[in-house]
Image (tube, rainbow, N blue to C red):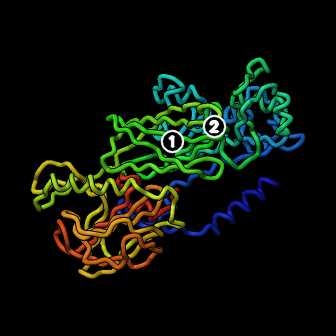
Amino acid sequence: MRRVLFVFVFGLALLAYPLITLAQTDDTPVEPDNPDNSQPVEFVPRYHTVAEGESLYFIATFYGVTQEAMEIANSITDPTLLFVGQQLLIPAADGEIVPATYAPRFGENLDIIAERFGATPNEIIRENYLLSPNSVIGGQPLRVFSRTGSSTPGEAPGVGHIVRPGETLATISAQYGLTLAAVMDANDLTDDLRLHTGQRLRIPTLSNDAYTTAPGLWQEMSFNNFPIRQGDTVAVYIEYLEPGTPFGRITSPTGELIPIRFKPEGDGYTGLIGFDAFSAPGQWDVVIGGEGDARPWDTFETSFFVAGAGFSTQYIPLEDDQELRNTENTFLNTIFIDSNPEPLWTDVFRIPITGTVSAGYGDARSYNNGPIYAFHSGIDFRGNIGTPIFAPAEGVVVFAGELGLRGNALIVDHGMGVMTGYYHLDGFDVALGETVEPLQQIARGGDTGLSTGPHLHWDLRVWGKAVHPTRWLERLFP
């Protein structure tokens, strides 16, 4: 009877589910409606919280799956060791296997990935020809055979606990109100002999937060925008158990070093990283550490993957002065990296002009069929001389003047390394040092500098890296 009621309520929920309209961006075409409803339905993984007196056989029977499928989906070796409050992943009927492609999150290990799909680490290693369990690279797609009935991964709930001197499995279990078996099973432990001071344990609480894999005294490390591609902005968040000052850097496949500039955020620190259109695709390395108040922080090293974005090449029928361009870029970089450390914006950025796009972000550029040494660092909007231009977010004007290639130029610092540039202007409506508000008119469109006609070139920088501006119109950073 309970299953019939569940199906009836679930059906009503589907009928009442609102339609979602997706906004078209310059690199995401809108797909036409599917009138015949032939699009396959995506099943969301289900979870069951174990209640007093329930056995694994009872739970499996209630959901119409086999006990064996439940054991595989939840990595259960002893079905008698269930505990009240334990969350169990419900696989598809008869343990149906669904092929999936998954880009691991920053710092996610193979055990957590396997649990989220009801798979096993060895299966993922074999399917992806990994050399070892440590070969997982954040953002690099893995092929996974999911036993949850869905290609969408579930979450592995839990919090981290660092073992302190004198603690035992029994005292830790009691601290969180869990059985000894629950903590041992979550960490593949057999006895206290495998416990040592400083060891990180996963505590399988009923928290809605997903468990984050991090070594030693690190509480959390996350990149919030996986998978990463050229033109992306990525926010890094870290927490460490001891006070101090964090540092970090990333290294590209070509050896480019980019520092991570952190600022305090909640119980930890956050920083922004920009990947421009010429960022090298492939494996990047990251190192994060800190100067602790009492002792140096443990250094954490891992890798992540940056994918190409498929930008094309534009051929511009104008002469370009490469020496002038290099000189101008060098001058502007001194401005772009001198940013207020705190973010000044409070909402998603707004589009700065009403007009159509004449040139998108990221395409490599050849001037008069010459060599390619630059890419289009922003977006060009068509407009007339005098077209109003508005601030996309709160900020402070840090440059207003004339440049050789960019013509009349305005630069606004939004803090935390984020700056927006407005080029080829006819005139300014704000002055150097002035604070601007969202949608305040700051300039007028023009045809100055290296230009083929009246337009606005708008770009957005993250610590000097020109990133895709429209991605800041779609979500709130950090």
Taking 94 as reference, is 423 above or below it? below
Asked if the residues shown at circle 1 and circle 2 are in contact, with their CB atoms under 8 angstroms apart, the answer is no
Dot 1 amino acid type:
Tyr
Q: Is residue 328 left or right of residue 114?
A: left
Circle 2 is placed at which residue position? 293
Q: Is residue 51 left or right of residue 458?
A: right
Q: Position of residue 120 (x, y in %)?
A: 60, 30
**Residue at (71% x, 34% y) in the render:** 202
Dot 2 amino acid type:
Asp
Q: Is residue 80 visible?
A: no
Q: Position of residue 17 (x, y in %)?
A: 62, 67
User: How many numbered discs sit on the rendered protein?
Assistant: 2
- Asked which quadrant contains residue 1, the reply is bottom right
Residue sitting farthest toward the top: 193
Q: Secondary structure at mark 2?
A: loop
Q: Residues within 10 Å of mark 2 (few under 14, many from 20)?
A: few
